Structures are given as C-alpha cells and as structure tokens.
Amino acid sequence: MHDKTQLKAEAKSVLDGLKGKTLSNKDRMAIPVQDMPCQEAAIRAGNMEEVAIGYSEEQARVEAYRCLQCKNAPCISGCPVSIDIPGFLRLSAEGDFTGAADVIRKTNLLPAICGRVCPQEKQCQLVCTLGKALKSVDKAVQIGRVERYIADRERTSGQSPIPEIAAPTGKRVAVVGAGPAGMTVAADVRREGHEVVIFEAFQKPGGVMVYGIPEFRLPKAIVSEEADKLRAMGVKFELNTLIGRTIPLETLFKEDGFDAVFIGVGAGLPKFMNIPGENYVGVFSANEYLTRANLMRAWDQKRAATPIYHSKRVAVLGGGNVAMDSARMALRLGAEEVHVLYRRTREEMPARAEEVEHAMEEGIIFDFLSSPTEILGNEKGRVTGLRVLSYELGQADASGRRSPVAIKGSEQDVAFDTVIVAIGNDSNPLLAKTTKGLAVDKRGQVLVDENQKTSLDAVWAGGDIVLGAATVILAMGEGRRAAAAINRYLI
Amino acid sequence: MNKIIAKERLSQEVFRIELEAPHIARERKAGQFVIVQTDVDFGERIPLTIADADTAKGSITLIFQAVGVSTHRLAELEPGAYIEAVLGPLGNPTHIENYGHAVCVGGGIGVAPMHPIAQALKAAGNKLTVIIGARNKELVILEKEMRAIADELIIVTDDGSYGRKALVTEPLKELCEAEPKPDLAVTIGPPIMMKFCAETTRPYKVKTFASLNTIMIDGTGMCGGCRVTVGGKTRFVCVDGPEFDAHEVDWNGMLLRLGAYKPLEDAAHKELHESGQCRLDALADAVMAKAGLGKSGGAS
Ligand SMILES: Cc1cc2nc3c(=O)[nH]c(=O)nc-3n(C[C@H](O)[C@H](O)[C@H](O)COP(=O)(O)OP(=O)(O)OC[C@H]3O[C@@H](n4cnc5c(N)ncnc54)[C@H](O)[C@@H]3O)c2cc1C
Ligand code: SF4
Ligand code: FES
C-alpha cells in the first residue's frame, strides 16, 4: 500500500482510537506498521522525483506510538551516533515535533538526509525490541521514517534554528572535502567560534550526496539547504579547489595560516572487475554514470551539455546501494531492460532493503548467483554483451557466511549494450601521494587514532577515506569525533 | 569564479584567453591541465591544457578550439566575464630533464599545450626541434612563440598553403634517420596523429611521450571515464597521465573510446548552428566580410 491519502486516513482513524487511552505494551504492539507512501512504480520509473513521499503527521504519530519506550533502549546502541530514539519518538507521539527535532539535533546534524539513506534495518531497527517481539525486522518501529518526517517538517517550516556561534577565537580550520564528514566537522568546529573554510574539488558541496545518490532518493535541494545552513553559520566554501594540486596540504599551514586541517575526501576511486573487455565503449563505472546523470544533470537532456549514453539493455554489476542507484537511474534514462548481476543472493545484498524492494517494483531484473567473466564487444569497440558464469552458495565458513562457488561450464553469453560496474570504491590516492608524511594503509586508507588524528601534526581525517566506502552516518559520526578533538586541540 | 582578463582569436576557430587563477598560476607546471565549466548547473566539464601562467599577475592562459557546444560557449565569453568554475592544475607535470636532443611535435591545437613543455625542455638545456603541423596556413598557431625558443622549427600543412606540404610524420622520420637520432620525442595533437608519431619513432627506439586528451568528467581520478590501456594496464589519464609512453598506449582502444558520444555531440553541435544560436558564426561572418571574403559557413 503506497497511497498517501489512504494511508493518512487509516492513520487518522488509528490515532482517534488511541485518544485518551493509556497504552499497554500489548496495545502498542497491536498498532499496525505505517507503510511509506510512494509514487506508483510505473509512474516513478519515468521521472526523477523522490520515490518515497514521506509520512503525514498522522502516520508519524501512529508509528511513534508503536515504540515500547524500552528502559535499555537497544536502538540507541544500534545507532552509530546514539540518537535518543525513544526520546524523540515519545515527543513525536504526543505531537511535539519541535521538541523531537531538538532531541535529534543534539547528536545528528543531517536528519533529513539520514532519515532517507541510513540502512536502518541494519542499525537501530535491527535491534529494536518491537521487531524482535513481532519476529520480523520489518515490524520494528520505523525509526528512520519518523526521523525523516520530523526533519522535513522543520525544514519546510522555514524555522530551522541556526546554531549559536561562540565568540571568535582567531583560530582557523581547513576542511578538505564537502561530503557528510567534512560538513559535520565544519558545523561542530564553527560553533566553537573558529573560522572554517571548506575546500571542495567539485563545483557543488555534498560529496557523494550530490554526485552519487540520485535525486529520486535524496533531493539535491536538501543537500544544498544543509550547505546554506553552514554558510549562514559563517562557514566559507572554496569550491573547485583540489587540495594536493590547487593548494598543497602543507601550504594550508605554511602560507594560508590554518591551525588545523580535517581530511574528508571520501573513497572515490572506482573499482573495476579486471575482466577482459572492460575498456569497451559502453562500460562505465557507477561513479561516471551517476556523476553524469546527477551532478552534471544529464538526466535533463534538454538542458544539460554533458551527454549520457543511450542504452537499451543494461547490465549492472554489484549488489550494494551503488548498484541499485545505477540500475534505477538507467531505467529512468530510458533503458528498456535493466539487469542487476550479483554473485550471491538477495539475503547477502548489502544495499538498503527498501532500495532493493523499490528496484524490484520498478521492474529491474535481478540475476542472482551470476557474474561475468568477460565483456563482449564488436569491431567498433562497443559492448555487445556479457559472458556470464553461474554460481551456487557453498558450505558456510567459520563466520557462518556461505560464499559463492562457480558452477563449471555454466557460462552463457547474454546480450547487453551497456555495462555499469558498481562494485564499490577504493581510496583515491591523490592526497596521500601529494602529502609527505600522511600515513595510509596498503589500500590507501588514511590511518587515524581513536580521535581521528592522522600521522601528521594538527591533521585529522574521517569518513570514507578512513573507513573505505561506508555510509553517510558513519562519516558523520567520525566527523563529530574529529571535530571534538580539533576543538580540544584549539583551546 | 574566474575573471577573463584578455582574449584573442588566433585563427577562425582557435582562441586564447587569459584568466585570473592565482592558486593555479602558483602551482602549475608544464604539462598540467585544468577543467573549465562555463555553467556549474548544466555545463560540461572541459579539460584544457594550461598554455602559460603568470605568477606575478596570478593568471593562466588557455588556448582552445571551438569544436563543440561547450567550447563554443567558452569562446563567446569576453574579457570582464567570469568562468563559473576552473579546477586545477590537474595531472602530472611533464618530466623535464636534459635528454640531449628533443623533438616536439604539435598538431593543430596541440601546439598550444606543447609550448610550455618545449619551453621547459629548452630551459633544461636540450637541443630543441619543433614540428608544427596544421590543416592549412590559417590554422598554424604560436609560430612566433615557438620560433623564439626552438633551435629548428619545421612547419608542415596538409594542403601546402604554408611550410612543407606533408604530414608531421615525414620530418619526424627524417630526424629519426639522421645521425645522431633524437633522444626524445614529445607529441601532442589529434590522437590519430599521435598514434602515427608513435609508429614513426618506434623502429628507431626513440623514447616518445604523448599527452592524451581523453573524455574526462571530474579530472581527479573518481570516475574512470578517462581510462586507457597503457602497457596492458588500465590507467586513468587525469591522475596517472596525461603523458604516457606513446609506444605503450593502446591507440585503437583510445580512438574508439573517444568516439563514444560522437553521434550525440555532432547532433548537439549541428543544432547549435542551425538554430542560429551560435554567436561565433555571426562573429566569423563579420571578420570574413571585413576581409572581403564570403560567408564563413560556421566557426567549425
Ligand atoms: C551511489 C552511492 C550510493 C550510496 N548510497 C548510500 C546510502 O543509501 N546510505 C548511506 O548511508 N551511504 C550511501 N553511500 C555511501 C555514502 O555516500 C558515503 O559513505 C559518504 O558520502 C562518505 O562521506 P565522506 O564525507 O567521507 O565522503 P564523500 O561523500 O565522498 O565526500 C568527499 C568529498 O571530498 C571531495 N574531495 C576529494 N578529494 C579532494 C581533494 N583533494 N580536495 C578537495 N576536495 C576533495 C570530493 O569531491 C567529495 O565531494 C552511497 C555511495 C554511493 C557512491
Ligand atoms: S528498541 Fe524499538 S521499541 Fe525499544 S525504545 Fe527503541 S525504538 Fe522503541
Ligand atoms: S576524469 Fe574521472 S577519473 Fe579521470
């Protein structure tokens, strides 16, 4: 059920029934899970607008009423930034959404974004007592959806408070990279009265949130509102500036007078399969495909100067969010048939559950237990298909994970004109290469201590460049820790 | 936002602009490039080699050919106007040392990025031979600048309207056959020309660098759109290059990849002219009229 009006009406009648009652746990457990209103699959596959429309006030309150207000609140420890979840749910149930927003803001700076893109079913909702009691993670309190409602309500009210800024300290902090890690550091450090400049290579702030995650999942207006909020706090942006090339990191200290630097440059080095045919025309990294479509707005083909490949049959390789986004973007750009090839099965897919579900509804075809051994092409160097090998799940190993085993002789050639490689990102080596003394591990990830401090004096790092390709919330969590350390250092 | 402080039309379709970019001017070295965007919302990211820089003024010089919609938009900007985004310097600087005798082969617009490299090679003590190739006399650029630094300057045109009527590979081959043969060749120009330069020097085992101009998006190693096969390995031109051993480059693969969007680009370019949107056409017509010539038929 996805219809907004109907869902709202149903929620209203549930809410009326709850009025004036003191709810027992049993009562709460009986309240139905609130579905997310969505655009119809057939319609949304042809537009770029947001798929999930968001709860109505009634739905948000009903969903919040489902929370059992557990004393031990396992959900809080499931949350990477330890939001007081029962706290904001209690206020939401009562209809005090301003109070709820204040609770969230104490630990989460980007709730409108996290409410949309966090893998809740693997974090707070995974450990939710209600889900456990009802024997399904799908029946846990829909914490992320309520969080999104609270954040959107505040956003659209035009009354998002601008945090107070302490008196100027005369200290200057440079933040490298305007992704979620860098934006978080900027906010937390600026609040203490330090001057903050964010240096960003791209023409727009947001990192993966603008170039990778598509509009239909995270409207770009939300990301730019967050950047505007930072500007209102007095944070300066130096866009189109590649630290390590435009300004070497050392120069930030030596000539530009910065007292501390945070590195939040993200992962940003696309992995390829290393199979024959990968350089044929029509083979793209997900980063390239999505950057063309999102940041360069190639989906708006009338207005954008950046071209996008015209595809009919698309194969997407991978099983994470990046793969889901690529597949669904290809569909929206006019592909007739889009396949996702994944070496394991649906259970092992690292993508957010909701995205996999949405992709299936939209008609993306999932070829599980299969992976190509070769990309086929014609004399013009264009992709004509894939040689696909089938797999089966083998015995569980010590960790209980069943790894895929190739089935000998199962290769088949399947026709495709486009292949999008979406198997993740490694660390971009540029900054490490151009910065003497910055210690990285063999995969190029910046090494940090428990306070996110790097091997260099007065330099901290966090987010994907430290964790490898991870999540928005983990990047934010690392940013908060680094900011706290920077603030202590600058006293 | 970078302000254009000077602009000059070098030939019908080739422009030189000087723009404010103090950080880039300070850091750039021969062989590096920038990515330019005239419109940060809908514009394309255009990679252009830095032709020159003035650290005192805090400016860089770019030379480009108005070949597609995006370069047309750039060519339409006049001094005082701002380019919305300029990112750089990108790529690795050319490795400069005293090789002995260096031959620089620049074709068409490729002469522009060659100039700072030739300058640096000369400054490092190399004997410098420069070969400039162009379709016709009108398209020969930077002759004066190259003459000022080269020990020998050879100009060839396809139609013989200026210099020798030949392809650049002819004098290059002669140089390789001479005793002693050159110690280094550097080639920048259309990919097909660079490919044939590589084939020309290969039998003589003259070390040859080519500066590749692939399709690019970010220019920072994030997308892989610029990848080429070099020595059997996939390399990203924007961060691993732009210069590679020309004898190791998979030229055919690169040529195919360059054509990926050709039909789309041609259609967009055609529409630009046919819809009468191209202000360069009008400008070109005005120039031609002044010179007592006919209608230009479009800048390119
Ligand atoms: C397609 C896609 C879908 C995703 N979906 C989800 C999802 O649903 N949920 C989720 O939680 N996570 C998702 N992720 C992962 C998530 O986006 C990242 O983990 C997160 O953005 C990392 O944040 P960050 O701040 O570390 O880096 P990034 O967001 O990568 O930002 C780094 C920024 O630094 C800039 N930069 C790089 N080098 C330099 C330099 N030298 N100088 C200046 N600037 C530089 C980059 O241009 C970039 O803007 C997804 C990722 C992708 C690619
Ligand atoms: S675990 Fe679930 S039910 Fe318990 S407090 Fe958290 S959200 Fe509420
Ligand atoms: S242009 Fe994107 S990696 Fe080189």
Image (tube, coloured by chain):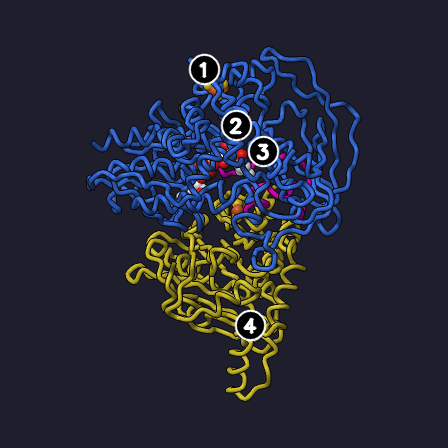
Horizontally, residue A408 falls left or right of residue B134, namely: right
Residue contact between numbered discs 4 and 2, judged by CB atoms under 8 Å: no
Mark 1 / mark 3, whichever is N-terminal = 3
Residue contact between numbered discs 4 and 3, judged by CB atoms under 8 Å: no
Q: CA separation, marks 1 and 3?
A: 24 Å
Q: Which of the 4 image quadrants contains residue B174?
A: bottom right
Please give the name of the residue rendered at 56% of the width and 40% of the height, measured from the top-left corner: A53
Tell me whether marks 1 and 3 sit on the same chain.
yes
Q: Which residue is mark 4?
A: B278
Screen quadrant of the N terminus of chain A: top right
Screen quadrant of the C terminus of chain A: top left
Q: Colour of chain A?
A: blue
Q: CA separation, marks 4 and 2?
A: 59 Å
Q: Residues within 10 Å of mark 4 (few under 14, many from 20)?
A: some
Q: Which residues are magenta?
A: A267-291
Q: Chain of mark 2?
A: A
Q: Which residue is mark 2?
A: A62
Give the residue furthest to the front.
A20
Residue contact between numbered discs 3 and 2, judged by CB atoms under 8 Å: no
Labels 3, 2: front one = 2
